[in-house]
């Protein structure tokens, strides 16, 4: 009897050497059935079941990525939520195209907003989108002036200005001689002329401004392409 048992054990070892030589990891489904057996050399046994719960197939293949322990923390990548131990979860890195097996990308700033990928993950931000347009250390959602041009975002959005481009602060959108940022400081409407010109004024680009409207000088004659109403409502 002992001889038969010994032969059976040796035969089983010969057929399934992984059970005795390698560390094994098991994956279970919701019914507590083994669906995968992972061996530390990358060998994977995958099992399927029929409606009665009987094993129907077994696939065998190699996938070292499942059993590798990239960061050496004692947890294989399959179970490890942070394979490279860089402080960013694998799900975050996969979502935004980062390298979940290379910890060096944690300190990078992929979107150039002055916030590292690691901090972006900690603050639930998108590391591929500029979250701090003016690089003032305040992310856009908390910054009342995203482009730091002296005009609050609420003011710029109200009047159709660009809240992410500071270049529109010194533009005189309504041609009344007052820049947009100055209109904000004076609590004026940057789209409405706030006073009339007694005599026409010619800007450096050839634009003529008068109480008749805005136009271009052509052979000594004024042609107004954008007539304006008299102040305030005409």
Image (spheres, rainbow, N blue to C red):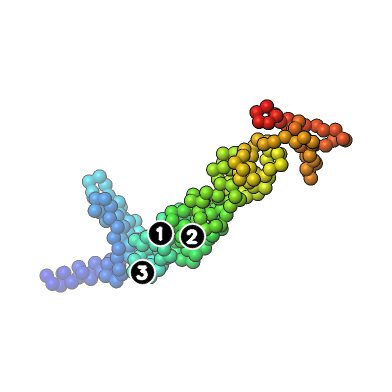
Compare marks 2 and 3 and give the one earlier in the sequence. Answer: 3
Quadrant of the image containing the N terminus: bottom left
Residue 108 visible from this viewpoint: yes
> Disc 2 to disc 3, how far (Cα)?
22 Å
Frontmost of labels 2 and 3 is 2
Residue assigned mark 2: 117
Q: Within 10 angstroms of label 1, few (less than 14), some, or many (20 or more) residues?
A: some
Query: Which picture quadrant has residue 218?
Result: top right
**Apparent side of residue 46 relative to residue 87 in the rendered image (left or right):** left
Residue assigned mark 3: 73
Residue 58 image offset from top left, x and y in percent: 31, 55
Frontmost of labels 1 and 2 is 2
Quadrant of the image containing the C terminus: top right
Q: Nearer the viewer, residue 64 or 206?
A: 206
Residue 97 visible from this viewpoint: no
Frontmost of labels 1 and 3 is 1
């Amino acid at each position: 009897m002992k001889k038969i048992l010994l032969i059976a054990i040796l035969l089983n070892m010969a057929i399934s050497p992984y059970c005795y030589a390698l560390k094994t990891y098991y994956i279970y489904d919701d019914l507590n059935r083994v669906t995968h057996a992972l061996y530390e050399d990358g060998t994977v046994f995958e099992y399927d079941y029929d409606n009665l719960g009987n094993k129907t197939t077994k696939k065998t293949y190699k996938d070292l990525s499942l059993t590798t322990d990239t960061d050496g923390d004692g947890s294989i990548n399959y179970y490890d939520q942070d394979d490279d131990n860089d402080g960013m979860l694998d799900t975050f890195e996969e979502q935004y195209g980062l390298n979940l097996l290379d910890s060096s990308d944690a300190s990078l700033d992929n979107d150039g907003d002055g916030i590292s990928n690691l901090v972006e993950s900690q603050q639930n931000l998108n590391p591929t989108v500029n979250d701090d347009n003016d690089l003032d250390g305040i992310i856009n959602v908390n910054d009342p002036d995203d482009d730091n041009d002296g005009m609050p975002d609420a003011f710029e959005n109200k009047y159709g200005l660009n809240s992410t481009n500071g270049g529109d602060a010194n533009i005189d959108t309504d041609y009344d001689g007052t820049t947009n940022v100055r209109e904000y400081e004076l609590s004026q409407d940057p789209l409405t002329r706030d006073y009339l010109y007694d005599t026409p004024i010619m800007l450096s680009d050839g634009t003529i401004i008068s109480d008749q409207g805005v136009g271009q000088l052509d052979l000594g004659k004024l042609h107004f392409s954008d007539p304006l109403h008299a102040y305030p409502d005409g």
